Image (cartoon, grey):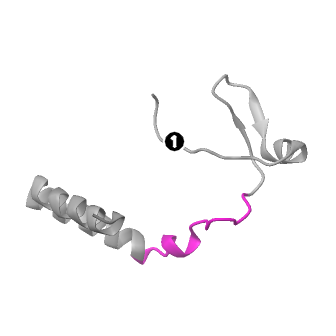
Amino acid sequence: MTLEERLATIREQSRTRMAPEGRAVLLRSIDDLRASGIVQRVATVGSPAPGFTLPNVAGQLVSLPELRARGPVVLSFYRGLW
């Protein structure tokens, strides 16, 4: 099974697991996001990240420009607390 076929299967299975009301809310939210133009503003692979300073997991401030000065940087984003 190809990746595309597997993803199609997962999408189909998720349709049957969600209540129709919940699915309608989800689809409406997706349509609202697309209509907002957010898709056109999403960063693409290889696009430069803007400079920023944020706390790391230890609470220390980390600056992207300072890290870039030392070499290549890999950014990893996660949502929520683990």
Please give left or right for residue 24 compared with residue 46 in the image. left
> Residue at left 41%, top 77%?
35
**Crowdedness of circle 1 by 10 Å Cα count: few (<14), some, many (20+)?**
few
Q: What residue type is labelled 1?
A: Tyr
| Total numbered badges shown on the rendered structure | 1
Q: Is the magenta stretch mostly helix, strand or loop?
A: loop
| Residue 34 horizontal/vertical position (percent) | 41, 74
Q: Which residue extends farthest top?
A: 58
Q: Which of 5 and 78 is in front in this view?
A: 5
Please give left or right for residue 3 compared with residue 10 in the image. right
| Residue 30 horizontal/vertical position (percent) | 33, 67
The quarter in which the N terminus is drawn is bottom left
Give the magenta-colored segment's residue range. 35-49
Label 1 SS: loop
| Residue 20 horizontal/vertical position (percent) | 9, 61
Please give left or right for residue 20 compared with residue 38 in the image. left
Answer with the quarter of the image where residue 64 lies: top right
- Kindly identify which residue carries mark 1: 78
Q: Which residue extends farthest front?
A: 1
> Residue at left 54%, top 76%?
40
